[in-house]
Amino acid sequence: MNNEQTSVEAPVRFTPATVAELRRIMSLPDFNPVHRLRIGVKGGGCAGLSYILSFEEPKAGDEETDIEGIPCIIQPAHQLYLHGMEVDWGTGLDARGFVFRNPNASATCGCGSSFAV
């Protein structure tokens, strides 16, 4: 198994609120410093594809990047779907949690966590 990783320019932008929330999570006492923020997509969801946003250990084939000081990992095949996307952290009643603004999406679901291209 090849654990070699390459570094790429980030296809995703984080708002200041997102950076603050991710740094808060990373400062928790039980946060594993080996983990990186995985940004990606997977099949499923009501619109066809769902977003992946989770802290986990890097895997073979992952490309590493740094977004606003947050170490991130992305599978190369996912970059096509993520290029130009902005991730925001919403705290209001109408947008609580991470909000994805993806210019590549031709349709999104009502909750905003699923999209079609």
Image (cartoon, rainbow, N blue to C red):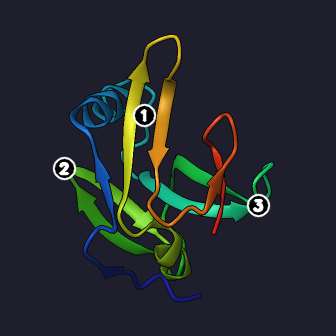
- Callout 2, which amino acid? Glu
Q: Which residue was labeled with disc 1?
A: 31
Q: Which residue occupies 53% across, 17% down?
A: 94
According to the picture, the residue beneath numbered tag 3 turns out to be: 48
Query: Which quadrant of the figure contains the C terminus?
Result: bottom right
Residue matched to label 2: 68
Q: Residue furthest front?
A: 106
| Left/right of residue 116 with respect to residue 8 in the rendered view | right
In the foreground, 72 or 116:
116
* 41 is higher (above) or lower (below) than 4: above
Front label number (3 vs 1): 3
- 115 relative to 9, above or below: above
Q: List x then y, in percent, for residue 75.
A: 51, 75
Which secondary structure lies at badge 2?
A: loop
Q: Name the residue type under label 1.
A: Phe
Q: Position of residue 104 (x, y in %)?
A: 50, 67
Indicate whether 59 appears above or below 76: above
Horizontal side of residue 112 vs 82, given as left or right: right
Disc nearer the start of the sequence (3/2): 3
